[in-house]
Image (spheres, rainbow, N blue to C red):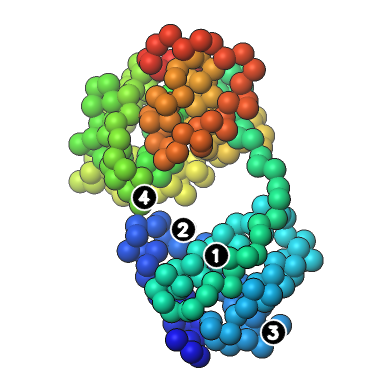
Amino acid sequence: MPNLSFDYALDLFSNSLTKSGKSINTIVAYKGDVNQLIKFLQSQLKITTVDAVQTSHVDKFKKYLTKDNYTAKSISRKLNSIKNFFSFLKAEAVIDSDPSSEVKHPKYENDLPKILKPIEYRALRDACRHDSRSTAIVELMLQAGLRIKEIELLKLEHVHADKVIIELYESHPQREVPLNNSASTALNRYLQQDRYDSKSKHVFITKTGRPLLARNIRSLLNRYFAKAGISNAKVNDLRNTFIVFQLMSGVPIDVVSQVVGHKRISTTEKYLQLIENKKEAKSIKLKEL
């Protein structure tokens, strides 16, 4: 399609992401990266249509990002968005060739996942011990490996005595996650004693009865990290700690991968780099921290 506008092409791409079940945050990130390329092409190279973009133009954008002090990891992420954009347009026969296919990602080393030391997650537990809602959230991440989004979406009907059901969401399939005694006790205490009255089906709610959003959960736990004196910690470090502890305890990697909802076992394998002395696998039962 000659003289195809960037706006039209980006709308096509955005709609396809929505239909494929990508999260709002993912779509916003993709669009932001592609828009940055578009602005560069229009202002620096005077290119105004998608069909006019060439490999050299995308490569110049890559060099521009490097000169503007973007890290290799950030540039690689932006290129991934751009490659997905042009790959989609080519697959839909919107353009004849993909100008980004020959542009290589910059090399960089992946940062290892951060985990909490026992003294740190115990301090966090102590800091929020009088807040049953926060305690339940911490235990679900630390003892069951739930993602922050999965805690936001968790429904009352999917809570059982020894497990929770994680519904299909975005591109993640439904799965069952076993609960050990600590996680089950903390969750039941919150539900039976301290959860506010609400018609909401969500497990975690605000004082006004509305679902507790992921950003609210992150802010809440960050306050307790600070109270516990844990610096440079992120909420996802709780989930990372669960994964590493289970692998270190000898739980088979395929079991851990299934429990935490990794799509590829290679994602779980990267955590092995954090383990010095891995116990021999003897049981598929998850260990309690």
Q: Secondary structure at mark 2?
A: helix
Among the two numbered marks 3 and 2 on one chain, the one whose residue lies closer to the N terminus: 2
Nearer-the-camera pick, 279 or 211: 279
- Judging depth in this view, the residue of 122 and 107 nearest the camera is 107
What residue is shown with label 1? Answer: 83
Kindly identify the residue that appears in the image at 57 percent across and 29 percent down: 271
- Point out which mark residue 171 bears: 4
Mark 4 is on which residue type? Ser
Residue depth check, mark 1 versus mark 2: number of the one nearer the observer: 1
The residue depicted at 61 percent of the width and 13 percent of the height is 277
Residue where numbered disc 2 is placed: 25
Q: Mark 1 or 3, which is nearer the eye? A: 1
Q: Which residue is mark 3?
A: 45
Q: Is residue 143 above or below residue 222?
A: above
Q: Residue 139: image x %, image y %?
A: 43, 26
Q: CA distance from mark 1 to mark 4?
A: 20 Å
Q: From this viewpoint, is residue 33 visible?
A: no
From the viewer's perspective, is the residue at label 4 or at label 2 nearer? 4
Three-letter code, disc 1? Lys
Q: CA distance from mark 3 to mark 2?
A: 29 Å
Residue 2 x, y percent position in the rendering: 48, 89
Label 1 crowd (10 A; few <14 / some 14-19 / many >=20): many
- Identified at 53% across, 82% down, the residue is 50
Residue 120, image x, y percentages: 60, 23
Find numbered disc 1 in the image and state the secondary structure of the residue it sits on.
helix
Whole-angstrom CA distance, mark 3 to mark 4, is: 37 Å
